Amino acid sequence: MRILYHLPLSPYCRKVRLVLAEKRLPFELRQERVWEQREEYLALNPAGTVPTLVEDNGLAIPGSGVILEYLEEAYPDTPLLGSTLGERVEVRRLVAWFDETFDRAVTRNLNGEKYYKRVSGIGQPDAAAMRAGYANLRAHMEHLGWLAEQRRWLAGPAISLADFAAAAHLSVLDFMGEIDWAKYPSAREWYARIKSRPSFRPLLAERVPGFTSPAHYADLDF
């Protein structure tokens, strides 16, 4: 059985879970407490981060970016990178925007402070970091809403890795009750469409000990 080592509220792990489900590839989830630095896990991924995907043949693929490129090459029947060179550039641009810029400005300052610090036992949330996260969230959500108004999906006419990267980060923040969707109607309409997909259902049904999601989190109609 294919194995995905993960943390439940890691957007990078959620992104890979969504793509595996979209490609209809069965997998087993194994939670990895990366702060414990297990030798067995470091042998699979020397960086000690999640996610890591281990294929049936034992091939270990570390890191969400490497995993997604691998899945596109190994399982091309459900393509998620775009059909033209221009579309692929835009998909990659938006994936990088969410996984680098959005993560640095928003996700780490909110999810990192409220979730990761708590589960890893490395301290209390930093109020200044959280204020920065909230301040940065608005501009990013407004840009996402603009993209949703201009296109059917974020990178163009077809759903792509860009949508799953964005949805993974937003689902984590939404689980923690950090997004006031009433302020971002266009982004909300896009998110409602993507979270209604079958691939999203396991994320919406997941419960994380010690945390309670808002009532709308699992509601497909908000």
Image: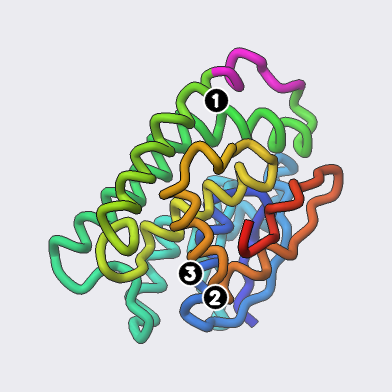
Q: Position of residue 70 (x, y in %)?
A: 38, 70
Pick the front one: 222 or 120: 222
Q: Please determine whether, in this image, residue 117 is positioned above or below residue 211.
A: above
Pick the front one: 192 or 86: 192
Residues at discs 3 and 2 in contact (Cβ within 8 Å): yes
Q: Of helix, strand and loop, which one carries label 3?
A: helix
| Magenta span contains residue 141 | no
How crowded pointer 3 is (Cα within 10 Å; few <14, some 14-19, many 20+) is rated as many
Residue at (37% x, 44% y) in the render: 144
Residue 139 visible? yes
Residue at (79% x, 57% y) in the render: 207
Magenta segment, which residues? 124-131
Residue at (62% x, 62% y) in the render: 221
**Disc sitting over residue 19 in the figure:** 3
Q: Which residue is mark 2?
A: 21
- Which of discs 2 and 1 lies nearer the camera? The answer is 1
**Disc sitting over residue 134 in the figure:** 1
Q: Indicate which disc, 3 or 1, sits on the residue closer to the N terminus.
A: 3
Amino acid type assigned to the residue bearing label 3 in the image:
Val
The quadrant of the rendering that contains the C terminus is bottom right
